[in-house]
Amino acid sequence: MSLSQHSAPVAFARPVLVRDGVYEHLRRAVLDGEIAPGERIGEVELGERLGVSRTPIREAIMRLTQDGLLMGSANKGVRVRTVTAQEARDTYAVREELDGLGAALAAAAHTAADAAALRAALGEINSARDGDYRQQTRLDLGFHRAITGAAHNAALGDLARNLEQRVALIKHQTRTYNAHPDTAAQHAAILKAVLDRDAAAAREAARLHVRTFAALVVNEMNPDA
Amino acid sequence: MSLSQHSAPVAFARPVLVRDGVYEHLRRAVLDGEIAPGERIGEVELGERLGVSRTPIREAIMRLTQDGLLMGSANKGVRVRTVTAQEARDTYAVREELDGLGAALAAAAHTAADAAALRAALGEINSARDGDYRQQTRLDLGFHRAITGAAHNAALGDLARNLEQRVALIKHQTRTYNAHPDTAAQHAAILKAVLDRDAAAAREAARLHVRTFAALVVNEMNPDA
DNA sequence: CATGTGGATATTGTATACAATATTCCGAGC
DNA sequence: GCTCGGAATATTGTATACAATATCCACATG
């Protein structure tokens, strides 16, 4: 096993950059709700905890800020972002369009591998129905990512990923448990339309699902209208 | 005028951060086409030219990379992004949805100030019809930004801004001069529908405009299809 | 002559040092 | 007792130093 002879085409030894590791760590911590919305993130403390210097910490924080997961003003540090009810409404309005587009494109462009991934993602959701809202948020994110992935549109993938993360943040802020009775049926309808390659039905099913869930979450955030 | 007594609520003396200045400088240079797509950007050289250290340079570069204006792999530096024909098609497909949504929302939500800004932006385009493609790109971007601004949806604003920049990059790459005869009429139709608060018409007008221009640009990029 | 191998060079990635701004808390004054 | 400085502290912003990786070119080798 003379692996050390050639360069290093091994798959597991990807040249990991410290900043990427910090980014993934922080991102996961925020999306899993380990750091609460509004909680402050100190560069030095985080650096000491992870055993790295401030430089990669800062670079990861900047990326997450642009992702919309953190918020911060100059010289005042960053916090896990808190979202207002209006911002949540705005986000869902955009997400309705993009998820609709994603489902329509997925219906037209999905491959056999995409179909398998979609079925697997939905299966996980259905078999873990009684998990907590964190697990539910994570699995739901996985299902939607599978759809946008099946759309095979890089620009959509970038933007949808951004939106999904913001939605996950909103869910953690409200701690909304998706107990809506139509959820399972709506998920199934989206999957069926996509697999049937019915773009129009897929788009409408995805949009309806977003509307249903948006109403649930936004209502949870704010007593008004 | 004892301004020095209280903190410093003066508007013109915004606490400018070096990284923000570098970011705007680089962003403008890329969007104005001063740096050609594919051209390399060296951290040290740029730092010396601007008279700042590498730290704010790197932070600006990371932001622009996430914006989709630069591209780079680990340890290999960054270049002004080059876009493939497929990526351009993908981008326009998404933009059609978002611009349509933006126009529809703008029709419903625009204020008197928004209306004035929209008229001004369109006036600039029409009075500078004979400029080069750089000026045209800049003014067109201004018009679309005015629309998404009038939509008063923060999430849409973020994503649309991202998309607009990518489109501007594509235009510089193809050096497409928008000579399509319908352009002026389409712009006018969008503006009219928005000002009439006709959301459905505004959405369709915006989508048609994107489709028209996308066909022009994509055709310019690649002989196929 | 093509090729690939080695080192010299250049460039990026990370860590640390220094500067500027913000926060905190204590005491003076009313 | 409350409020308004103001110094002490802490934290972020920037600059620089060091480490790791990539690029380039000369040179040897088939």
Image (cartoon, coloured by chain):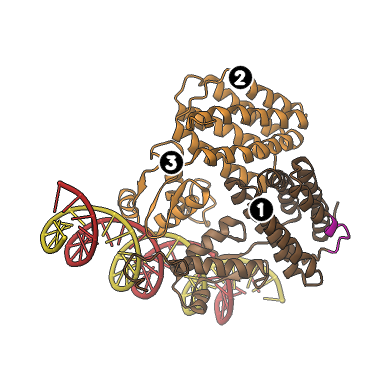
Chain colours: A orange, B brown, C yellow, D red
Q: Residue at x 31, y 48 (%)?
A: A49
Q: Is residue B89 magenta?
A: no
Q: CA distance from mark 3 to mark 2?
A: 28 Å
Pick whichever, A204 or B219, lies toward us. A204
Give the percent coordinates (x, y) of residue A105. 73, 38
Pick whichever, B24 or B58, lies toward us. B24
Please determine whether, in this image, residue B194 is positioned above or below residue A114: below
Q: Which residues are magenta?
A: B179-185
Task: For mark 2, name the chain.
Answer: A
Q: Residue at x 50, y 32 (%)?
A: A138
- The mark closer to the camera, 3 or 2, is 2
Q: Is residue B167 visible?
A: no
The local secondary structure at tag 2 comes to loop
For disc 3, the neighbor class at 10 Å (few under 14, some 14 to 19, many from 20) is: many
Q: Is residue B183 magenta?
A: yes
Please determine whether, in this image, residue A185 is positioned above or below residue B69: above
Task: For mark 1, name the chain.
Answer: B
- In the rendered structure, the answer to whether residue B61 lies left or right of residue A152 reads left
- In the rendered structure, the answer to whether residue D28 lies left or right of residue B83 reads left
Q: CA distance from mark 2 to mark 1?
A: 42 Å
For disc 1, the neighbor class at 10 Å (few under 14, some 14 to 19, many from 20) is: few
Please determine whether, in this image, residue B160 is positioned above or below residue A131: below
Pick whichever, A206 or A50, lies toward us. A206
Task: For mark 3, name the chain.
Answer: A
- The mark closer to the camera, 2 or 1, is 1
Q: Residue at x 53, y 59 (%)?
A: B63
- In the rendered structure, the answer to whether residue B79 lies left or right of residue B132 reads left
- Residue denoted by label 1: B112
Q: CA distance from mark 1 to mark 3?
A: 40 Å
Question: Residue B183's image quarter?
Answer: bottom right
The tag on residue A182 is: 2
